[in-house]
Amino acid sequence: MTPEPQLTTLDNGIRVVTDPMPGARSVTTGVWVGVGGRDEAPGIAGASHFLEHLFFKGTEQRSARQIAESIDAVGGDLNAFTSREHTAFHTRLPAGDWRLGVELLGDVLSAPALRQVDIDAEREVILEELWSALDTPEDLVHTLAADGMFPAHPLGREVLGDADTVRAMRRDDIADFFEKHYRPANLVVAAAGRIDHAAFCDAVATHLDLSPGGEPPDRVVPSDDIVPLHTHERPGEQIHLVLGWRGLPAGHDDRYAMTIANQILGGGTSSRLFQSIREDRGLAYAVYSWVESHSDAGMLGTYVGTSPGRSAETLEVLESELTRIIESGVTPDEFNVARGYLAGATELGLEDSGSRMGRIGRMLLATGTVVDLDEQLDRLRAVTIDEVDTLLSRLLTAPRTVAAVGPVDAGSLGAAV
């Protein structure tokens, strides 16, 4: 058994959480910022992602090359990602070098250079990333589904922004966004591995010595409106389909039932959709379901990619499985398998410092608390089959959005709308 996660709020308002792993040989450190794609004004859509790129282009003290070489010199990793509600920066280093991670993250998040020459160069890199996403049908259909689920709302926007906003982004826009949102009250610093909590807090206080202040972004709850059908016709060997329904926000009481419901529906190889569409009929290679949870909204989605000539049959099987699970509920066997899988996968997935850092950092930022792993597993195991049945019936009978990309005729999808 290892000690429970420890939480401290520094004098300037930064929340620090650690998950000690005495036997580990690594430490993963992450800085979680409570701002993402949904928190940008329309004219600067993509600013969070733009900043993510620019932080590693250098600081007042270090060049981009010096940052990269310092990490490579100890065999570590340095990376970042942007989502709709947060941006995260993280290092994974040998345990004896953990202070380097705090020092580097503190530097890039306290004093980014934001040089015009770097902004102009990175603008082109981000445009290439955007073109790549738009050129990948499976990525594009998820973008269309989000737009259909949250129309005219920032949650429905592409996190990367669009070509117009990326091209128009000025240095002052990016710097102002940084100054407003990258403030102590909006930061969580998390670490897992062979780490001492008190020593880690002291290092964070030294290297992220920001003046107190800041507040969470002011977010507008999405309306109940959805767009029933979104299609993008283009040549290809497959039609990519997403059916989506409104889900649950991050802190909802039914969130554990939601994870089990998703696992049963399409979360693994024993799921309803995988077995019926891929294993039994061979209609698709990729078929799955997933859930998204935001601070005030969520989504349950199903995806399948299939050849145009088999799309009607695939959609018919998908609809049949949805109807069956609504009318008859889940079976005790699949409920027990799904619940057991999630409990076991949670434990196995937390054997490395990176996954444990991600768990506590994301949880603290999203909910304001960190649930002990044993308590999290107890809550999962306490879910009943009736709770899953009730939840699936409620979600799957609500209005939904359908998104399709490929050689598709919108009229042929009418039955799915």
Image: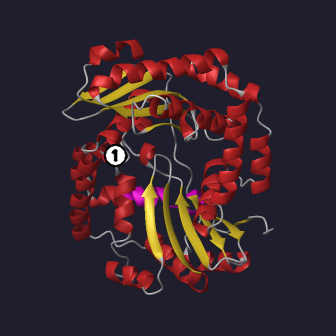
Task: Look at label 1 and name its amino acid.
Answer: Ala
- Residue 126 sits in which quadrant? bottom left
The C terminus - image quarter: top left
Q: Secondary structure at mark 1?
A: loop
The N terminus - image quarter:
bottom right
- Residue 156 location in percent, x, y? 41, 35
Residue shown at the point (28%, 70%) measured from the top left: 115
What residue is shown at x 55% (from left), y 73% (from top)?
208
**Res. 241 visible in picture:** yes
Q: Is residue 302 shown in magenta? A: no
Residue 192 position by quadrant:
bottom right
Horizontal and vertical percent position of residue 151: 40, 28
- Residue corresponding to mark 1: 45
Q: Which residues are magenta?
A: 176-186
Q: Position of residue 160 (x, y in %)?
A: 34, 49
Main SS class of the magenta portion in the image? helix
Residue under the point 61% across and 18% down: 326
Q: Within 10 Å of the Cα at label 1, are there few (<14), some (14-19), or many (20+) other Cα atoms?
A: many
Q: Is residue 273 above or below residue 130?
A: above
Question: Is residue 48 shown above or below 203?
Answer: above
Q: Is the residue 129 above or below the residue 45 in the image?
A: below
